[in-house]
Image (tube, helix red, strand yellow):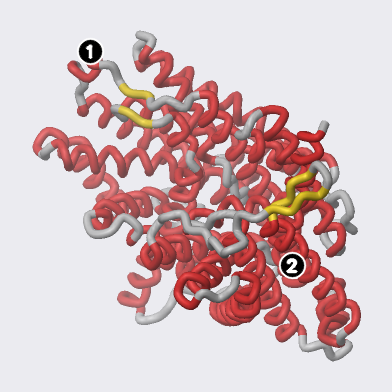
């Protein structure tokens, strides 16, 4: 029983990070109607930002969030201006299709560039507190995982407040709901698109920083993080940040339960099976208002 | 002009193995193998508009089944059709539920299913599959080359036939607008499913030939998403929804990859990724169309309408 509890706790801690990884993808998908399958590669870039800041200047990984986020925000603006922004005029269906293809090409390019620049080795940030754990009764909680969950939650809460309480957030929500109506009401739709894409990238950057502290990073992690984010987005459906977070935690718990009960390889399989099941049975997601 | 080009390429493909060295025959085999992979993907994506990101799964099944039976002593002429049929059966299993999904959901759904299969295979068959010494002793490259050449001809011929058939027209109608296609009496689901099955069996045959050709590989390698990604790159580079585009894309892709791999392994991915993005954004017709545009400019001094 205690082992189970430990596994579930661990899964929930990892799952918060999944939620954070997915929310950027969901934001871009919901607002721009584009599926950026290079999202995992943006997470990878955020991870390397934190890794190098720590390795070269000893910057604390949680402090480096404040660099990785804005850095990836800038990368997002550049990617939007250079690539994805060229698709906004297209008809809905071909827009999604082409955004997948461009994201796919971009993922290959970023992956190859990362290998050329930083080699294919696994890297991790080993801060002084990396191995420390917190004892909560019978449970053992690694500090970095707890920190990751806290940051993920804070980032999502911040995003929620931004979208609900600010004018820019309102413009983003209005555009997601009906861009034509928003446009007629004077919302600068293209600027909103750029903002949403950059925000989504920044969230990927923050997620990447957390991955670098609590997991390992390598140029190859992109595809599996994209898949995780897609799984969470499909589980949650669009339109609910809180739902995305909960779906992430659910995925984390399901993964660690499956890994514990059935064996380590089922960690990856369970998420994909859930994904296919939800996709075919309830395509609007568990908490969504429809995709 | 085109007929002459095709005839010349065919003649070269048939004659070259008799005069060229083993390295060249190997390159030729890899090009032709990728022609089959690309054409089978092109059939579903180019004509039916369905982006299948789980293509590698059927390649892997074909490779695994064919190789398994052949190493048990079955002649390859019997093993390959079985591998092909196994891939088609898997295509039915995957296609029936996933083809109800639209657009991006079909793409990511197939990707997820292929990843599940890859992980299962990697777990169930972790050992490298190597040919035993007595098979290697009587291993000949030429029959393998001609088998793959035959498959490349069959795959390209299938795409050509589909493009000219009533079925192909229905498929294109589905690609252009599913609702309108349904309205004029095209059963879109059936058209997509048949194209999916054709595509899965063709790439299963390619996998079978790969299993017959390769001396040793990890079973999961045949299921690697790289096979899918290569297909996407080759088809878009050459020209999606055309008969010759994927063949041109495959030749371009494999030869440039081999040339670049001599310097840096990752370089070709960088080059192809960049070229791919440019093609998607600026040159939706691929290389084949680019050649047409150039020719038009040269002859008429203007762009084609």
> What residue lies at 47% left-to-right and 70% top-to-bottom?
A55
For residue B180, say whether it is visible: no
Same chain for marks 2 and 1?
A: no
> What residue lies at 23% left-to-right and 16% top-to-bottom?
B133
- Left/right placement of residue A257 relative to residue B196 reads right
Is A113 in front, or is A35?
A: A113
Tag 1: Cα neighbours inside 10 Å, few (<14), some, or many (≥20)?
few
Q: Compared to A139, does B291 lie above or below? A: below
- Disc 2: host chain: A
> What residue lies at 38% left-to-right and 67% top-to-bottom?
A117
Q: Which residue is mark 1?
A: B134
Mark carried by residue A244: none
Q: Compared to A24, does A89 lie above or below? A: below
- Disc 1: host chain: B
Tag 2: Cα neighbours inside 10 Å, few (<14), some, or many (≥20)?
many
Q: Give the residue at the far top of this rendering.
A: B73
Q: Give the residue at the far left of this rendering.
A: B19
Q: Which residue is mark 2?
A: A151
Query: Residue B242 at x, y = what percent?
Result: 46, 52
Q: Tell me which corner region of the image, top left, top right, bottom left or bottom right, holds residue B77.
A: top left
How far separated are the C-alphas under marks 2 and 1? 60 Å
């Amino acid at each position: 029983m205690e082992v189970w509890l430990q596994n579930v706790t661990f899964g929930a801690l990892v799952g918060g990070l999944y939620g954070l990884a997915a929310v950027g993808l969901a934001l871009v998908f919901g607002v721009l109607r584009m599926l950026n399958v290079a999202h995992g590669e943006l997470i990878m870039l955020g991870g390397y930002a934190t890794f190098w800041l720590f390795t070269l200047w000893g910057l604390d990984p949680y402090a480096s969030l404040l660099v990785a986020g804005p850095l990836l925000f800038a990368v997002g603006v550049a990617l939007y201006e250079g690539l994805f922004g060229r698709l906004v005029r297209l008809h809905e269906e071909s827009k999604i299709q082409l955004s997948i293809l461009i994201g796919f090409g971009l993922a290959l390019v970023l992956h190859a560039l990362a290998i050329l620049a930083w080699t294919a080795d696994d890297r991790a940030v080993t801060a002084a507190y990396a191995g420390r754990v917190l004892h909560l009764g019978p449970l053992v909680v690694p500090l970095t995982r707890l920190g990751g969950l806290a940051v993920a939650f804070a980032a999502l809460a911040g995003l929620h407040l931004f979208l609900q309480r600010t004018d820019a957030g309102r413009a983003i929500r209005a555009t997601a709901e009906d861009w034509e109506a928003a446009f007629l009401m004077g919302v600068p739709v293209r600027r909103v698109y750029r903002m949403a894409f950059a925000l989504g990238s920044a969230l990927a950057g923050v997620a990447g920083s957390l991955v670098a502290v609590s997991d390992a990073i390598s140029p190859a992690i992109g595809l599996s993080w994209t898949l995780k984010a897609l799984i969470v987005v499909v589980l949650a459906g669009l339109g609910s940040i809180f739902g995305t977070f909960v779906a992430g935690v659910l995925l984390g718990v399901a993964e660690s339960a499956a890994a514990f009960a059935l064996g380590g390889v089922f960690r990856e399989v369970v998420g994909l099976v859930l994904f296919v099941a939800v996709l075919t049975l309830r395509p609007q997601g568990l908490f969504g208002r429809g995709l | 002009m085109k007929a002459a080009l095709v005839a010349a390429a065919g003649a070269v493909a048939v004659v070259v193995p008799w005069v060229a060295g083993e390295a060249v025959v190997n390159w030729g085999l890899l090009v032709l193998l990728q022609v089959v992979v690309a054409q089978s993907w092109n059939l579903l994506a180019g004509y039916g508009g369905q982006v299948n990101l789980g293509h590698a799964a059927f390649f892997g099944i074909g490779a695994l089944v064919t190789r398994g039976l052949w190493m048990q002593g079955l002649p390859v002429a019997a093993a390959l059709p079985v591998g092909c049929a196994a891939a088609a059966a898997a295509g039915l299993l995957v296609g029936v539920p996933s083809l109800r999904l639209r657009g991006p959901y079909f793409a990511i759904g197939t990707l997820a299913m292929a990843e599940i299969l890859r992980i299962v295979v990697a777990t169930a068959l972790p050992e490298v599959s190597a040919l035993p010494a007595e098979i290697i002793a009587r291993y000949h490259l030429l029959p393998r080359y001609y088998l793959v050449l035959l498959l490349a001809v069959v795959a390209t011929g299938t795409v050509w036939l589909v493009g000219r058939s009533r079925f192909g027209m229905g498929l294109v109608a589905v690609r252009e607008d599913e609702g309108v296609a349904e309205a004029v009496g095209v059963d879109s689901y059936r058209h997509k499913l048949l194209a999916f099955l054709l595509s899965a069996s063709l790439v299963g045959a390619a996998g079978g030939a790969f299993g017959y050709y390769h001396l040793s590989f990890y079973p999961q390698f045949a299921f690697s998403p790289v096979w899918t990604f290569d297909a996407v790159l080759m088809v878009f580079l050459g020209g999606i929804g055309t008969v010759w585009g994927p063949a041109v894309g495959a030749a371009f892709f494999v030869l440039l990859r081999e040339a670049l791999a001599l310097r840096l392994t990752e370089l070709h991915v960088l080059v192809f990724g960049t070229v791919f993005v440019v093609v998607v954004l600026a040159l939706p017709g691929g290389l084949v169309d680019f050649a047409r545009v150039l020719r038009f400019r040269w002859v008429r001094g203007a762009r084609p309408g």
